[in-house]
Image: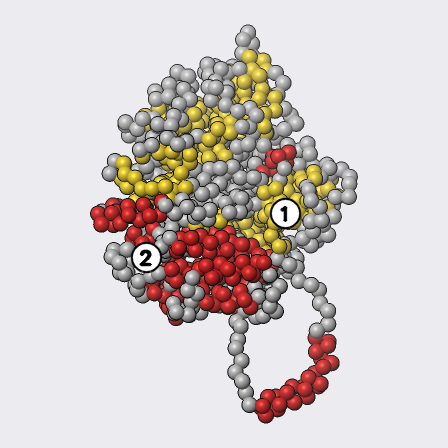
Amino acid sequence: MPLTAGSRLGTYEITVPLGAGGMGEVFRARDTKLGRQVAIKVLSESVESAPDRVARFEREAKALAALHHPHIATLFGMEQEGGKHFLVMELVEGETLDARIARGPTPVPEALAIARQIADALEAAHEAGIVHRDLKPANVKSTPDGVVKVLDFGLAKALDTAPGSQRDISLSPTMTSVNATGSGTILGTAAYMSPEQARGMPTDNRSDIFAFGAVFYELLTGRQAFPGETVSDVLASVLAREPDWTALPAPMDPRLVRLLHRCVAKSRRQRWQAIGDVRAEIESLIADPQSGAPVAASVPTTATRPLWKRALAMAATAIVAGALAGAIVWILRPAAPAVPIVRFRMTVGESQSPAFTNFNRHILNISRDGSQIIYSGDKVYLRSMSETASRPVVGTDGFTTVSHPAFSPDGRSIVFWAQKDRTLRRLSLNGGAPVTLCQLSEGGLGLDWAGNAIFFSDSNVGIKRVPANGGQPELVVKLADREELYGPQLLPDGETLLFTLGTRGMPSWDEARIVVQSLRTGQRQTIAERATGGRYAASGHLLFGRGGVLYAVPFDAKRLAVAGEPVAVVEGIRHAAPTTTGAVHFAVSDTGTLVFIPGAVTASGGAMQLALFDRKGTADPLNVPLGPYSRPRLSPDGSQVAVVFDDGKESNIWIYGLSKTSAARRLTFGGRNKAAIWSADGQRVAFQSDREGDASIWWQRADGTDSAARLTRAEAGVSHVPQSWSRDGRHLLFDEVKGDRVAINDLNVAEGKSAVFVVASDVTSNAAFSPDGQWVAYTMRQKNSAQAVVFVEPYPRTGAQFQISKDAEDGHHPVWSADGHELFYTPGPGSRLIAVPISTRPSFAFGETVLIPRFFTNAPPTTDRTYDVGKDGRFLGLRTDVTEAGTPIASQIEVVTGWFAELQQRVPSR
């Protein structure tokens, strides 16, 4: 039976899965006896099925458990429970080395410090007679305190079928992500094997030294020492080819180059014979970094020639030198210094955290000269590279939420989208009030200030152009039916727009494409498939996102053509929820400075944590694994959560119990299933499903003891979205969506008949019955108005209507408190939640709004709400500011200056 959150293995309580590898699955767990967090590695069936292998594991575990070192992750022991053998290990928090390498080459001083700690760990193990045999970046972690820990020490030995035999390299003890493929694991293992391992020969400590050299090389260069597209290619590289020594950063201390050469020598006899000698050399380099003149990475040797040949060569050289002296002086005239490659993080203060809650729209940008950074949320914040702190931009507050901030070409002004009144506004950074440029008919989805014009996407209408001084917008790119776009950018030719193009209803924006379209002819062509958030960089590259990874491919802006295949250049970039927008949160200046917001990576585009929040925003994470969740709903008694799990391939309803002993249960099977709601008695769940082709409403017992049954049948081009169930269970409110038209329908469940409850609007209603079933709250945009409003009406309808949200702001996603004495809603994207006191006796009345800070994921106004309210008054929400291990991450911005030099090295564009 698979292990899930809340499962127990002896005294260990499973909390979340961490990954899987050749040995088995890895889980984060709590040692209930000692009260500590540990990592549990449950052995795979292939290991369990071989008694001799299990016995060997037990022998190795006893030896390894005695190995204690500050740079080695401790193995506490091997245990057995319910027929399962599992290893109990120290839980090491932090980043694996392969994640660090994915961000690019490591500066030499930092790489030396990391390598010294790895060598120190290997030296201690080798002195104890233990060889790692599977050293690689994925088996090394750096804790938040900067301490390096080597994982899985010596466990590879237990996988060997017999001493000296060739083992199956797919059985790697390395922990990979839960989505990794077996082939990826094999390839990663092969890339760090010594030649003797690749040949199936016996291994010793010198095999670890070879792997250490390969890891050290990769740290310094950001690329594998022995690359290849297949396992065979990699092994051939290990056996016959040298690393690309020219990839080492220059200038390079010759002592370090020689150290690396000896580490990865093909012959064991030519290699360093003891890792302790390597550690001593590294410490010498750290203590005396200036010793030895920098040389090119290849360190060539020169043979002695006869004296007369050397004299002749010297004479010829003198003659040529005299003739070319003038030319050389001219060629070597002073040039502008190159921008150095420097990496640092800007930590956003707690007071600015509202800027980091709505990732569905762009909130980050950089000036063209790379001297200023802006980010936005409740207001715009400005950070100059010459300053140590960010400051709010005066004149950008009071708009509820602002997004898509962009600099003018000269960096003296900014433009942004103000959500409050759906306007595009410009503001001088030298002071003054913001100027309204134009009104947006829908909502802004990206913009670009180019020359004297601003190009912006107006929701599902298309791309418009407005003069930088304001005026009547001109539609320059019109979208066809069901098309969606994001993030327009004018290319250097001044007549071609680049943007991300998607299709309404696609499972993820990762399935979109990057296109270019001529403003002159209207001709459109695709330049990248399965890509989102596309931007052209002055380095001659097209940059785009996919699955939380930034890719680069050479792009000729004149011919409008890419060359070669995209290469992953930065991993772990925050981007929008998969079905919302094409936002990928990075920006690049023309001078080569990269800025991005780091984020966890999953197949859906962001690890989400289900948590309960009090009114102060304090989070209490649920005992539920992280996942690509949406639309969580609490059962009426508050004991269970129904949530949509959508990884871009499948979409199903899962039920999680809030108690630690409750097991997870998948409720739906077949088709794409979304938008679950509970019946008032908590016995049934209604949801949308397309299992029979039409997007209609089905229902099923929450305990899964019956099959799903149809409640509605939608016509072609129409979808039904359940919203709320009445207290007596007889009526169900649902949205009938046809194109941009949304009408609230009232379904009589027993009779199977429905009637329109509220006339059509163009926003998701999120209609909600009050706890007593006598009132309905919903969102509707009034005719000829850009503002969405929260209304409350009696049920059944009497003609009375009460506007709850204020005229000065939008209102979306209404939810009643459990006692019906409060109504909550969100004022559109942002970090706020509004509470309104409600009384219904002797007549309906409501009080002044109360602002509640919230720190869970927000949904765009046009989508379903991503929060719920429990019986105890706490809010259930989806949290994205967490690591893959479920721990909170600080709001940060990564900055890399001189990034173009690194990009050209990895993805040459010319």
Indicate which disc, 2 or 1, sits on the residue closer to the N terminus. 2
Residue 548 versus residue 761: which sits nearer the camera? 548
Question: What residue type is disc 2 on?
Answer: Ile
Q: Which residue is mark 1?
A: 365
Secondary structure of the residue carrying numbered label 1: strand
Find residue 115 and name its label: none
| Quarter in which the N terminus is drawn | top left
Left or right of 445 on screen, residue 50: left
| Residue at image location 34% in from the left, 22% down from the top | 683
Give coordinates of residue 343: x percent, y percent: 60, 52
Residue 335 versus residue 579: which sits nearer the camera? 335
Left or right of 458 on screen, residue 730: left
Q: Does 81 appear above or below 768?
A: below
Q: Does 238 appear above or below 834?
A: below
Q: Residue furthest bottom?
A: 308
| Residue at image location 59% in from the left, 88% down from the top | 310
Q: Is any atom of residue 258 visible in this view?
A: yes
| Quarter in which the C terminus is drawn | bottom right
Find residue 169 and name its label: 2
